[in-house]
Image (spheres, grey):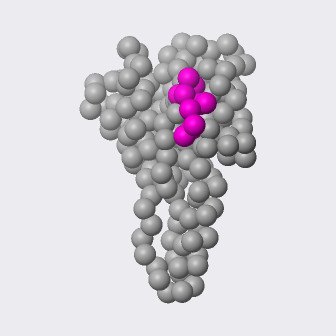
Amino acid sequence: GAGFVAADHEELGRRLAETLLEDWDGGDVLLLDTGGSCPEAEFRLEAALAVLTAAGVPAQRAAPPEDWTGRRWVMAFEAAATRQAAAEKEACGGSFALYGVGSSTAITAFLERGTIAAVAAWSDYAAGYLAVEQAVQAVQNQIRPLDPLPFSIVRGEDIYAPENQKLLFPVTS
């Protein structure tokens, strides 16, 4: 392949962990390890773990648990894991703060209801345009490195800010 369009995965993990740190008031953080189902998630997880460890926050990486009872802080590093953890939180009446990734309709709905504290979101539409641009450049032998796909950290209370509406509600914006 001539290239790819993606966010800077390490930066995404760092920023998501920094967002959790703004809210953290003690307790262990569970970093959901999805077992390699999304290779990018490993980079995000490792970067988040480094930030949390440097801040003295007890953090453990583990597969999604059978029992979510007693969890206070959870981080997911891929969209599917974020959706699954949010669904589990709602199903079991969990009170843990969930930080994840993605901008799908389901994730946006969980964010709006307060099930998810914050997500790292990017525009899939922008990614598509950048991918086409990169493909055209490759055909014309004008390959150049692309900047990473921009992303934003969005909290539930900020989903209707104009810049976030473009990420979360691209068809209606």
Note whether 78 is above or below 27 in the view shown: below
- Horizontal and vertical percent position of residue 34: 57, 41
Instruction: Provide the residue span drawn in magenta.
Output: 155-164
Residue at coordinates 62% horizontally, 20% vertically from top-left? 114
The answer to which quarter of the image holds residue 85 is: top right
Give the left or right position of residue 169, taking residue 135 as reference.
Answer: right
Q: Nearer the viewer, residue 165 or 75?
A: 165
Classify the position of the C terminus by image quarter.
top right
Residue at coordinates 61% horizontally, 64% vertically from top-left? 129
- Horizontal and vertical percent position of residue 118: 53, 29
Q: Nearer the viewer, residue 46 or 79?
A: 79
Classify the position of the N terminus by image quarter.
bottom right
Q: Is residue 160 magenta?
A: yes
Give the left or right position of residue 9, taking residue 80 as reference.
Answer: left
- Horizontal and vertical percent position of residue 164: 57, 38
Q: Is residue 22 visible?
A: yes
Q: Main secondary structure of the magenta part?
A: helix
